[in-house]
Image (cartoon, helix red, strand yellow):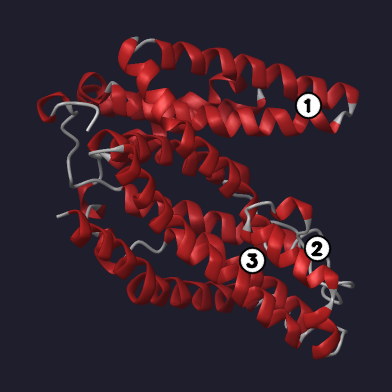
Amino acid sequence: MILKREELPNIPKANNFDFLRFVLACAVACCHYYRMTGRPSLASPITSPTAVSGFFAISGFLIFMSFCNSQSFREYLIKRVRRIFPAYIGIVIVAFLLFSLVSTLDWQDYFTNKESLSYLLANLSFCNFLHPTLPGVLADAPYTDSINPSLWTLKIELALYLCIPLIAWVALKKKLVLPILSVVISILCYYLNWKADTTQILLYEKVGTILYQSNMFIIGSSLYLFFDKVYPYRYYILVVSLLLYPLKESGWPDILFPFALAGCIFGLAFTLRFLNNFGRIGDLSYGVYLFHAPIIQFFTAKGWNDENRLLLVLAITFSLAFLSWHLMEKRILKRHRKQIK
């Protein structure tokens, strides 16, 4: 444990993080449905990029807390591996098997094809960008870039998990370093996005995206670090953040948007007490995030793509996420807790 027990922030166990993560996961699923089926998307206050950014802010808060509460880096790392890897590996393998049913290749060619092996190796190693598709699949689909576009965030997430000891060491030496760093990164991201728009150079956009999501993680970590100081002002933070949230597209306030988004999440997490018990049904957000896209792509490949499929996709996704949590993810986490007692 890197902090003494009495030095740890007193985080209320009754909070809405489970609910917020579920809402953000559903927002990603709905946005992906319209994008991947080629249908005009509906107007929504939460776009897929915004929802992903919200995930990183929550992750920064909770992962920093997990590290501070861990007895050692090894214990912290084991907890992260047990939380991330089982469902991730499961969906990669299941998608690989499932799409053999809709590939234009016969089974023997599909399973012996070098592209199939490349897909497995790339995705199991969190390098899905190297080979995001499978052979003979989705050639005529509206969205052909990837079987599961949600997976791109996991490698950034894992890298940030590994950086947490350094972030914590710096932050606990000089607490103001994290907030100052987040402001600098916000300005840099704004500049990179402007460069990407004016020069049409993809590298600026890629670097800006990675820095932006990393910044959300840092802002979330900062909120945990300064929790005792900001918690009494959570209602004011929520109101101000909600006022800033719609100003994203107006230039300069775009630099403030990461803070507005994180402020909304922080404020909502510790208000609205009637949502505190949402997590009793299980931590389904990770499963919803991982499972929805392959289901959409499978339906598309089968030609089951009429306007009423969104509800069916969500119903199947929720069911699989529920089963995954209760039959696999929760049990693996409980096994770890028993081992460290």
Taking the spot 10% from the left edge, 26% from the top edge, the residue there is: 6
Q: Position of residue 128 (x, y in %)?
A: 70, 55
Q: How packed is label 1: few (under 14 Cα within 10 Å), some, or many (20 or more)?
A: some
Mark 2 secondary-structure assignment: loop
Question: What residue type is disc 2 on?
Answer: Tyr
The mark nearer the N terminus, 3 or 1, is 1
Q: Is residue 326 left or right of residue 310?
A: left
Mark 1 secondary-structure assignment: helix
When the figure is inspected, residue 224 is found, relative to residue 321, above or below; the finding is above
Question: What residue type is disc 3 on?
Answer: Ala
| Residue holding disc 1 | 204
Please state, as top left, top right, bottom left or bottom right, where the C terminus lies in the image: bottom left
Q: Position of residue 77 (x, y in %)?
A: 38, 45
Question: Residue 240, can we see it?
Answer: no
Nearer to the camera, 235 or 5: 5
Foreground mark, 2 or 1? 1
| Residue holding disc 3 | 293
| Residue holding disc 2 | 143
Q: Is residue 305 left or right of residue 331?
A: right
